[in-house]
Image (cartoon, helix red, strand yellow):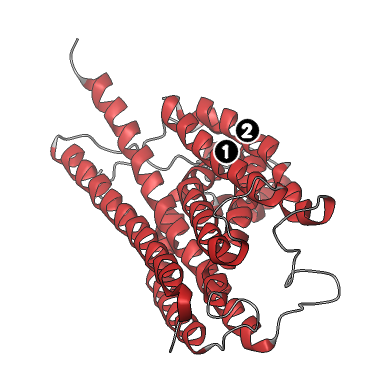
Amino acid sequence: MGWTDYRFDADQLSLRRDETKQATLPAATAAIITDNMTLIDLANPTRFLTLTARLLPWLAALTAILLLAGLYQSAVAPDDYQQGATVKIMFIHVPNAWLSMFVWGVMSLAALGTLVWRHPLADVAAKAAAPIGAAFTFLALVTGSLWGRPMWGTYWEWDARLTSVLILFLMYLGLIALWRAVEDPARAARAAAILTLVGAINLPIIKFSVDWWNTLHQPASVIRLGGPTLDRAFLIPLLVMAAAFSLLFATLHLAAMRNEILRRRVRALQMIQARQRPA
Amino acid sequence: MSLGPYASFIVTSYLLVTVVVLVLIAWIAIDYRRQKQRLRELDASGVVRRSGRSAAEVQ
């Protein structure tokens, strides 16, 4: 069974247990199927909505606490001997830059889920993540520019790191446009999944651009072999903010996935309604 | 806390991040309400899910 088999399922967009088929199977096979039902159940959007309703308030609260702690630590962090107080921009620029790539990584896994495993929630996850990833990438670019002007003397430089992140941002916009342009969710899902996997080639280019080319952008100072080169006074607020933004992504992503499931349920019900109308 | 000569760059960065995050939160919250409203309207028009449950039943 593939994604196309579920697209008109107004109820769950998910696998349905065929109890009668299972009843005719040999006991051993039936037992295996029963064990696997736990995994299949995870693909059930109705169960996902229940889980999301339970998780979201806790995630939102934890995100708010971590954001407040991170902002406080950023505020009291000392000035850097070279950057001065502009080092505070790094506490928001770096988490957004990390997440811009991480979200595309999540979307790439979801793309595999769509193309290989045909997981009913895979395309929902990818589509819900794209606008959030685009927002993080936009913030990484703009905060980087705002840091670059006083430190480099320019808002923008066409170096490998900045250009590859700009390409990532454009790819996010392209994917969002693709999902909006194709009306049939199943066709849009496959096209978007292929485009996402092709776009994933850009992730190592972004990461290693500062090593492969001579760039104005400085090399990695946190995620690198040999450990971080940052002083603890800067590393701790940076990591707290990174954790806060990661939780923010998790919260927003779950909420956006919930919305996408409801949107597809609305679409399926509207199609049922259209079929029921007398000609 | 003194932000030095580049205070405007720092404040603009933090304000921009705040605005974009708030817009994201508001967009997702409004979208959720819109979808629930559509489901309620479908429920009122008598469309029933294949499970037989109400259209407006979110979970």
Q: Residue at coordinates 61% horizontally, 41% vertically from top-left?
A: A167
Residue type (three-letter) at the residue carrying disc 1: Met
Residue at 34% x, 41% y: name it: A263
B50 in relation to A150, above or below: above
Looking at the image, is A99 positioned above or below residue A75?
above
Verify CB contact (< 8 Å) between mark 2 and mark 1. yes
Q: Which mark is residue A143?
A: none
In depth, the one of A24 and A242 nearer the eye is A242
Q: Residue at x 59, y 45 (%)?
A: A166
Placement of A236 over or under A39, stated as above or below: below
Percent position (x, y) of residue A168?
60, 44
Residue at the farthest left position: B44
A241 relative to A6, above or below? below
Residue under pointer 1: A171
Q: Residue furthest top?
A: A279
Q: Residues within 10 Å of mark 2 (few under 14, many from 20)?
A: some
Where is residue B17 shown, x and y percent of the image?
42, 64
Label 1 sits on a secondary structure element that is: helix
Query: Which callout, 2 or 1, points at the residue further toward the start of the chain?
Result: 1
- Point out the frontmost of discs 2 and 1: 1
What chain is tagged by disc 1? A
Residue matched to label 2: A195
Of the pair A16 and A144, the residue shown nearer to us: A144
Q: Quadrant of the N terminus of chain A?
A: top right
On the question of residue A46 being in view, the answer is yes
Instruction: Give the amino acid type for the residue marked by disc 2 in the picture.
Output: Leu
Rendering coords of residue A142 (x, y %): 49, 56
